[in-house]
Amino acid sequence: MVLRGVRLRRRSTVVPALRYYCAQLLSRWRVAVPALTLPALGNICLFYLVPLVGLAIRRASFGERPPCRPPPVP
């Protein structure tokens, strides 16, 4: 019974906060959209594209395998 009251109280505080947050995002969408998307694009570029570019450069200069790696054993 006590948990039900806590959940209702928590819900009654979270819903107005989310409404206010969404209203601010919609009212200032020219600032909000880049502020939310550019960090995500930065993380994608940093953690996914840099290793792929490095691998492409390595393969272009050394061929299919790097020179220090022995061939795989069948």
Image: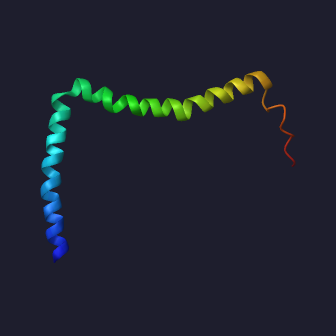
The colour scheme is: rainbow
Quadrant in the rendering for residue 48: top right
User: In the picture shown, does residue 58 fall above or below 23?
Assistant: above
Quadrant in the rendering for residue 22: top left
Q: Residue at x 14, y 36 (%)?
A: 23
Q: Residue at x 50, y 29 (%)?
A: 45
Q: Residue at x 74, y 27 (%)?
A: 59
Residue 68: percent from left, percent from top: 84, 35
User: In the picture shown, does residue 20 fall above or below 58?
Assistant: below
Residue 24: percent from left, percent from top: 17, 34
Residue 21 in the figure: left or right of residue 44: left
User: In the picture shown, does residue 8 fall above or below 72?
Assistant: below
Quadrant in the rendering for residue 36: top left
Residue 15: percent from left, percent from top: 15, 51
Residue 66: percent from left, percent from top: 80, 32
* Picture quarter with the N terminus: bottom left
Q: Nearer the viewer, residue 56 or 14?
A: 14
Residue 45 in the figure: left or right of residue 52: left
Q: How many marks?
A: 0
